[in-house]
Image: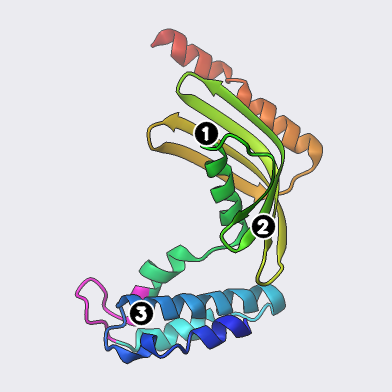
Amino acid sequence: MQRNAMLMYTSCGWFFDDIAGIETVQIMQYAARAIQLAKESNGKDFEPGFEEILQKAPANVKNFGTGKDVYMVLVKTTNVDLNRVGAHLAVSSLFEEHVAGERNVYCYSTKIENYERVDAGIQTLATGRAAVQSKIVLEKHAVDFAVLHFGDHNLICAVNARSPDEAFSKMREDLKTPSPEAILRKLCA
């Protein structure tokens, strides 16, 4: 929290007079991360107060009325948590040859465990488990993931906190086995 709180006071973010400018958006991202860590570590939620202050700051860009609008559109949507890191890892695993073992994803260390990939034509399904840890705040999280690539730019990815082994195995098998409805749709097409 302290690191991000210090970064949010970087002078370039407050030098310009446009709250929608790239510098100020970066500063708000640091503030958002400090707020996120405060909520996760001690349960205090500073976000409503922060949004109230930003509501009073007019934006120069016509698409944004206030600083709160800028925050909601350009900052909140970029918040990173360990599930999002797990999603990044899951999707990138589809496009790499060697997925097992430890690897770095930006400032996070990750380790894919229990990985399985099924290819069917241009479609690919990958399921697995991973451990994710921030190298900065040392926060750890274990995730289960499933990612389906339909070809081209069409992907669906789901990430959740680690489930019991039986539930994970059932999820994996359910994803690999088409439902009777899907088989009927295919036959009737």
Residue found at the far right of this picture: 165
Label 3 or label 1, whichever lies nearer to me, is: 3
Disc 3 versus disc 1: distance between alpha carbons? 36 Å
Sequence-first tag of 3 and 1: 3
Cβ–Cβ under 8 Å for marks 1 and 2:
no
| Residue displayed at 30% across by 81% down | 66
In the image, what residue type sits under mark 2? Answer: Ser
- Is 63 part of what is drawn in magenta? yes
Query: Could you tell me if the residues under marks 3 and 1 are in contact, i.e. CB atoms within 8 Å?
Result: no
Report the disc number at residue 109: 2
Task: Name the residue at the left extreme.
Answer: 62
Question: What separation in Å lies between label 1 and label 2 (alpha carbons)?
Answer: 23 Å
Q: Main secondary structure of the magenta part?
A: loop
- Residue occupied by mark 3: 23
User: Who's the residue at 27% across and 84% down the image?
Assistant: 18
Q: Name the residue type under label 1.
A: Leu
Say if residue 68 shows up in the picture.
no
Using a 10 Å C-alpha cutoff, classify the residue at mark 3 as few (fewer than 14 neighbours), some (14 to 19) or many (20 or more). some
Q: Residues within 10 Å of mark 1 (few under 14, many from 20)?
A: many
| Disc 1: which residue | 148
Up-down relation of residue 10 to residue 133 (above or below): below
Magenta range:
58-70
Percent position (x, y) of residue 49?
50, 86
